[in-house]
Amino acid sequence: MNTKRLFLLSSVAGALVLAGCKDASQSAAGSAAPAAAASTPVSIEAITAEAQGFNVGSTMSARTVYVFFDAQCPHCAALWESAKPLKSQARFVWIPVGILNANSTLQGAAILAAADPVAAMEAHEAAMRDKKGGIPPAGGDAQKQAIARNTQLMTKFGFGSIPTIVGKNAQTGELVSIEGSLPTAALAAKLGLQAPG
């Protein structure tokens, strides 16, 4: 696996797995790798039923793309920007996980607890870009538990890097799972969406 950094992830079940934060455009293997080695097959139905995140884009869209992200991950921040031009074509559900450090869970909980999670994510990413460490930790036990469940779900599917994108190709209906960040045009191509002009 071509990752920028490796981190130790402790899942809710107590199992330890290696996880990395990566840019999929730097690794051909990571650009659209189906989770063949996953202990549980990737299931959009399970993600829909079990994960807790927030919506970006049209909530009425027939196309839904799920993004497992860590609030401390710079490649997740890059994907946040790359996905913005595509939000008119799909509903992106951003699912916070706690992998990289303690702030991952605390800041993810703050985003989930916010009255406007999209605005909270924007403020967080701006603070990260300005080297201010992101938004202050917040959120209660309910949000922290949701992030623990999200992390466990991601681990159950065998994903080893963040961000991880799961959806269906809009043209073929084929399940797509991508570990790592991609620029807008490449992301659109993988998801079968129109690249912005």
Image: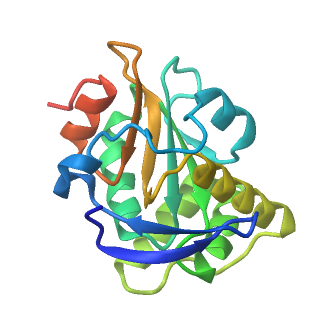
Which picture quadrant has residue 187? top left
Looking at the image, which residue is at 56% across and 70% down?
99
The one nearer the camera, 141 or 113, is 141
- Can you name the residue that lies furthest to the right here? 141
- Can you name the residue that lies furthest to the left here? 197
9 above or below 136? above
In the rendered image, residue 121, in percent from the top left (x then y), is placed at 53, 61
Which picture quadrant has residue 47? top right
Looking at the image, which residue is at 41% across and 14% down?
173
In the image, taking residue 108 as reference, residue 30 lies left or right, namely left
The one nearer the camera, 68 or 10, is 10
In the rendered image, residue 29, in percent from the top left (x then y), is placed at 24, 48
What sort of colour scheme is used for the picture? rainbow
Residue 114 visible in the current orientation:
no
In the rendered image, residue 27, in percent from the top left (x then y), is placed at 20, 54
Quarter the N terminus occupies: bottom left
Looking at the image, which residue is at 39% across and 66% down?
21
Which picture quadrant has residue 77? bottom left
Looking at the image, which residue is at 45% across and 87% down?
132
In the image, taking residue 93 as reference, residue 48 lies left or right, namely right
132 above or below 89? below
In the image, taking residue 141 as reference, residue 66 lies left or right, namely left
Residue 151 visible in the current orientation:
yes
- Can you name the residue that lies furthest to the top here? 172
The one nearer the camera, 37 or 53, is 37
In the rendered image, residue 50, in percent from the top left (x then y), is placed at 74, 41
Quarter the C terminus occupies: top left
Q: For the image shown, how many numbered marks are present on the structure?
A: 0
